[in-house]
Amino acid sequence: MEQAAVNISKAGFDEIRKDFPVLSQQVNGHPLVYLDNAASSQMPVQVADRIDRYHRFEHSNVHRGIHTLSQKATDYYEAARKKIQVFINAADEHEIIYTTGTTDSINLVANSYGLTNFSEGDEVILTEMEHHANIVPWQMAAQKTGAIIKVIPVTDSGELDIEAYKKLLSPRTKMVSVIHISNALGTVNPVKEIVDLAHEAGAVTLIDGAQSIPHQNIDIQDIDTDFYVFSAHKMCGPTGFGILYGKKHLLDAMPPYRGGGDMIDKVTFEETTYNEVPFRFEAGTPPIAASIGLSEAIDYLSAIGMDAIEARESELVEYAEAELRKIDGLRFIGEAENRASVLSFVFDHIHASDLGTILDKQGIAVRTGHHCAQPIMRRFNVPATTRASLAFYNNRDDIDRLIEGINYTKSFFE
Ligand SMILES: *Cc1c(COP(=O)(O)O)cnc(C)c1O
């Protein structure tokens, strides 16, 4: 069966919208404007069809199967791992571990690496702009080990205070775990510099790439981080699936996080020896269909080109920022020089949830709230923001509709 090619041609990004039927529906009597891509991106038909075909014609459990369907499913499942390795330019496909998402990946590292390597008085450095997924697992590991959490502060414009970070680093620093692109502010953090400084101090690094992998080319060997994590559903893939990248020598030394089938070498009631990496971390029947879906999503994104996607989104963000700036009373939360895909803002006299509700009545989907990042909301002294987050399939019409919607909402409050 032939795959439908990506609908990109010389006509450009507008053609691509045809790949996303979800975008051409009416919501509350208006054409949908989907600006909640930082929470989850939409899935193109190519990925949905691939997953559907797997379920209809190809499904079987992977590994250990002697029959043809099982061997084929195993081939697809392992080919997906190879595809992901190449996509992020990891050195070895065994450095790619399947998880249920960013959250699960961080919990795996905090438990497996953290609990065995942290001791009383050791320090874990996070930033003030972390997603809760990159805070709570470390707090739990710290409570169990006596380690201490340190936090890199954020400046008024929403950037990390790198000088303060340098002062936090010490021989006690065991882990530096930092968000690459902030889902609440849109700030793009200088992860290479952060990783280099951590390594100089003898610390290990984790980069939360949930918002960077969909928006830019990632070269893991260039960043040189020890761990990098992301979710499939923010990059045109399915929910409930994600990746932990880890350097092989670190993963090899890490104990399993979950026990069960597939992760073992030999089991007796007295003792179990464990399988090699990555299988040691993939207990039980894995999300086979999701791995094939992510593989297809990577083909889809690669056919467009991550550099083209980044350029497209930068242009849209610039346009949106300029248009939003014209609205009286709108205040951005996060105005970093280097920002991507996310526009977060507040009004003094309009509560974010009221704005979100009235926008929804006009078919415009934005997210309002704390964006799973309460500490950074507290830092900016706001309970919530309205967040418009863009993907490459958005266009200027979407932004114009957002601006109209905000102006319409404002007319009720004046
Ligand atoms: C979405 C997100 C997460 C959590 O991802 P899940 O898929 O819910 O596990 C973590 N960090 C950032 C920056 C995110 O945007």
Image (cartoon, grey):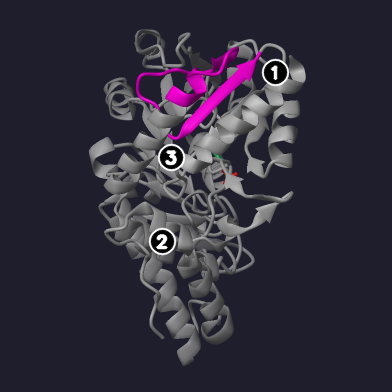
| Quarter of the image with the C terminus in it | top right
Tag 3, which secondary structure? loop
Circle 2 residues within 10 Å: few <14, some 14–19, many ≥20: some
Which residue type does callout 2 highlight? Glu
Residue 2 in magenta stretch: no
Residue 332 in magenta stretch: yes
From the image, tell me which residue sits under label 1: 383
Q: Nearer the viewer, mark 2 or mark 1?
A: 1
Q: Is residue 234 above or below residue 350?
A: below
Q: Is residue 138 above or below residue 197?
A: below
Q: Residue at x 75, y 34 (%)?
A: 357
Q: Is residue 141 visible in this depiction of the protein?
A: no
Q: Is residue 229 above or below residue 317?
A: below
Tell me residue 254's x, y (percent). 45, 46
From the image, tell me which residue sits under label 3: 209
Which residue type does callout 3 highlight? Gly
Q: Are marks 3 and 2 in contact (CB under 8 Å)?
A: no
Tell me residue 93's x, y (percent). 32, 59
- When asked about the image quadrant of residue 23, the answer is bottom right
Q: Which residues are magenta?
A: 322-347
From the image, tell me which residue sits under label 2: 276
Ligand 1 appears in which quadrant? top right
